[in-house]
Amino acid sequence: MFQTLQCGMPDLRVTKPSGLASSLFFHVYSGTNAIGFAQLSSRAENNHRRSISRRAAFDDAAPGVSYCLKIIEVSQNYRNKGIGSALLDEVIGFCKDEQVVSIFGEAKGDSEELRRWYQGKGFDLDSVDNIQLSF
């Protein structure tokens, strides 16, 4: 159930879903303390975003599941230590393994810093900070 979170900090563990569902939760623990989490939600469409074009390699792919990254959060005392990045890597890896078509959402917070962070993880962003990563 628990796996080591690969972020350079000792004794951090992550729990991941065991398969696809309408809501997916990832939790990060330091000992018995929950210090971070991510939530994804599936739905047929995201009516609150402008579509970002998909990569050409996937234009002919069979329809699949897409997930909205609702939130990714790390406790304040644990921020800027690579935990959020490692957690997002876990989310992306899980989605790839489960053959999810894309992850989308909205970059909330310090816009420029988040834009660079998501772009560094391979996400496309539009002019109003909607994010999308297609596999």
Image (cartoon, rainbow, N blue to C red):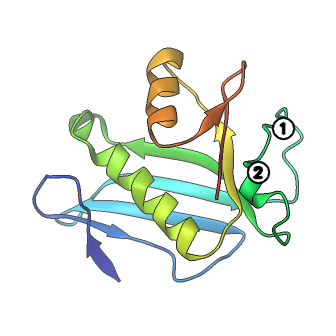
Please tell me in which quadrant of the rendered image residue 41 appears: bottom right
Asked whether the beta carbons under mark 2 and mark 1 sit within 8 Å of each other, the answer is no
* Residue on which the image places disc 2: 56
Label 2 neighbour load within 10 Å: few <14, some 14-19, many 20+: few
8 sits to left or right of 96: left
Left or right for 24, reference 26: right
Q: Nearer the viewer, residue 40 or 135?
A: 135
| The quarter of the displayed image where residue 48 is located | top right
Looking at the image, which residue sits at the far left?
10
- Mark sitting on residue 86: none
Q: Residues within 10 Å of mark 1 (few under 14, many from 20)?
A: few
Q: Position of residue 44 (x, y in %)?
A: 87, 59
Residue beneath the point at 29% across and 47% down: 83
Q: Secondary structure at mark 2?
A: helix
Question: Could you say where residue 29 lies in the image, as x and y percent from the top left?
Answer: 27, 62
Mark 2 residue type: Ala
Residue hosting label 1: 51
User: Eyeballing the image, is 113 above or below 70?
Assistant: above
Which one is nearer the viewer's eye here, 104 or 18?
Answer: 104
Asked which secondary structure carries label 1, the reply is: loop
Of discs 2 and 1, which sits in the foreground? 2
Separation of disc 2 and disc 1 at Cα?
14 Å
Who's the residue at 47% across and 65% down the image?
Answer: 93
For the image, the number of numbered tags is: 2
Quadrant in the picture for the N terminus: bottom left
Image point (71%, 63%), residue name: 101
Q: Nearer the viewer, residue 102 or 20?
A: 102
- Residue 31's place in the image compared with 79, above or below, is below
